[in-house]
Amino acid sequence: MHQHGHNDPNAGKLYELIKDVKIAMMTTVDTDGTLHSRPMHNQEADEHGDLWFFTQIQSPKTTELSRDSEVNLAYSDPSSQTYVSVTGKAEIVRDKAKIEEKWSEPLRAWFPKGVDDPQIALIRVHPAKGEYWDSPSSTLVHLYGYAKAAITGQQPNPGDQAKVNLS
């Protein structure tokens, strides 16, 4: 079980929802104070609930994180109607053993020298808060919800939604 959010019953579901999502949008604060988002390949959360991403050490995001470590991660899987947002603090990790542990061969496209690439680093995000929306994915369920709303004037149940304390 992940340590982050161990007192929140919804934490397990949040981690379960993001574990198979391949891409997360990472938002940082740019040097001019505006928000800057980019897609990042999602790694599985570790036993503490920290989230990991590979990066080039010389990149705009590492510069942004050195000035302001607050990040937002947005996960989306439209095929299953799953949406998750996680906020937390990020740090740059250059630990070779951790890089080797997290490495997978497809990453060579970005790091041609593999784990020995001098530009390789990790971003570890320590989650503080999260929120998820987990809706039924069936078209039939959506049509039923639409019809119910049209007939009764009541909004359909969009599925599970919860705010999660991960600190």
Image: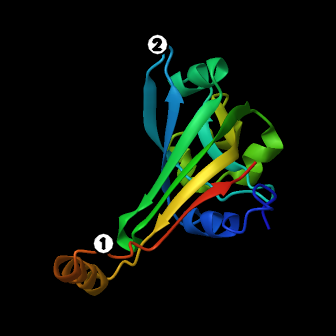
Q: Give the quarter of the figure containing the N terminus.
A: bottom right
What residue would you read off at disc 2? 32
Side of 122 relative to 19 (left or right): right
Badge number at residue 50? none
Please name the residue shown 69% across and 45% down the image: 128
Q: Secondary structure at mark 1?
A: loop
Q: How is the image coloured?
A: rainbow
Amino acid at pointer 1: Gln
Please name the residue shown 62% across and 31% down the image: 70
The image shows residue 34, relative to residue 122, as above or below, that is above
- Residue 77 point in image, percent of width and height: 42, 64
What residue would you read off at disc 1? 155
- Residue 98 point in image, percent of width and height: 78, 46
Residue nearest the observer in this picture, 42 or 1 = 1
Whether tag 1 and tag 2 are in contact, CB under 8 A, the answer is no
Side of 153 relative to 121 (left or right): left
Please name the residue shown 80% across and 37% down the image: 95
Res. 91 image quadrant? top right
Residue farthest along the top direction in this orientation: 32
Residue 58 shows in this picture: no
Are there few (<14), some (14-19), or many (20+) residues within 10 Å of tag 1? few
Which mark sits nearer the N-terminus, 1 or 2? 2
Side of 60 relative to 10 (left or right): left
- Residue 22 point in image, percent of width and height: 50, 59
Residue 129 shows in this picture: yes
Are there few (<14), some (14-19), or many (20+) residues within 10 Å of tag 2? few
